[in-house]
Amino acid sequence: MSVKLASASHSSIPAAQDAVALRHVFEQVNAGSCPRTFNFHMHTVNSDGQLQPELLVQQALAIGLQGFAITDHHSVNGYRLVQRWLDEQPLEQVGDRALPQLWVGVEITSQLLDIEVHILGYAFNPESPSIQLYLQRHAPMGDDAKAEQVISAIHQAGGLAVLAHPARYKRSPEILIPEVARFGIDGVETYYAYNNPQPWQPSPEQTRQVHRLSKTFNLLNTCGTDTHGLNLLQRL
């Protein structure tokens, strides 16, 4: 799958924070997008992953990713290190292969209908005051943990909010997705491998269910491996 990445919608916005361009990518994501073209869910040692940021980006290059986001829990430190590495690479060192586009990302533990869910934030300004509370390397508490508050904070920081792995929770996607849609969420992680198969592929039954709901509520579809181990092509 080859997707033409949109150029920055506003020259003053860093590409990693360009939510308009990322929305355009999400609109094209399908079951074949992950894990070798795009990957919008992965973790480094800056939260509960095993990959050092420098090794993660080198692996992304080797795979041939066009675009990706590091979504450490309550931290953008891994993102910052990888962005710095990408910024320092002379073009001649990567030959005829373009550097992948990296977007700002984070995964935030939230509360929705009395259960824990995870909200992914993308392409936001990590310096925005609205998001600082959620970048302190620990889960928010009280009212700050409410899904509607988390979604609002991501939007105030200029980003897109996505419900991670909607079929992994104690309540059905049939209940959760309408609720987060009511709070203005932008998308759902439609393509996800719930049983960690090898090779990675989105789980068919859950994909059909979540995709139907995303269409009903006019939500974007995203994909990601949710890598916690040493291989970006697997979850563990």
Image (cartoon, helix red, strand yellow):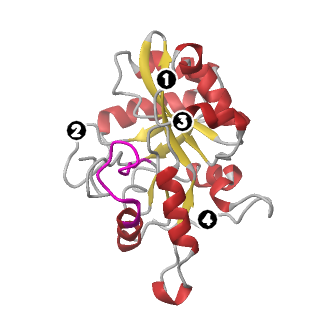
Q: Is residue 100 left or right of residue 53?
A: right
Q: Which mark is residue 152?
A: none
Q: Nearer the viewer, residue 114 or 126?
A: 126
State the separation of the CA atoms marked 4 and 2.
31 Å
Give neighbour class at mark 3: few <14, some 14-19, many 20+ (Cα, 10 Å): many
Mark sitting earlier along the chain (3/2):
3
Q: Position of residue 179 (x, y in %)?
A: 55, 17
Residue position for label 3: 162
Residue position for label 4: 5
Nearer the observer: mark 2 or 1; the answer is: 1
> Given the image, on which type of amino acid does mark 1 rest?
Ser
Q: Is residue 44 visible?
A: yes
Provide the residue span drawn in magenta: 41-54
Q: Position of residue 197 (x, y in %)?
A: 20, 47
- 177 within the magenta span: no
State the separation of the CA atoms marked 1 and 4.
31 Å
Give neighbour class at mark 4: few <14, some 14-19, many 20+ (Cα, 10 Å): some
Nearer the observer: mark 1 or 4; the answer is: 1
State the separation of the CA atoms marked 1 and 3.
12 Å
Mark sitting earlier along the chain (1/4):
4
Q: Nearer the viewer, residue 76 or 157?
A: 76
Residue position for label 1: 110
Q: Which mark is residue 195?
A: 2
Check the image and report above or below for 92 versus 183. Answer: below
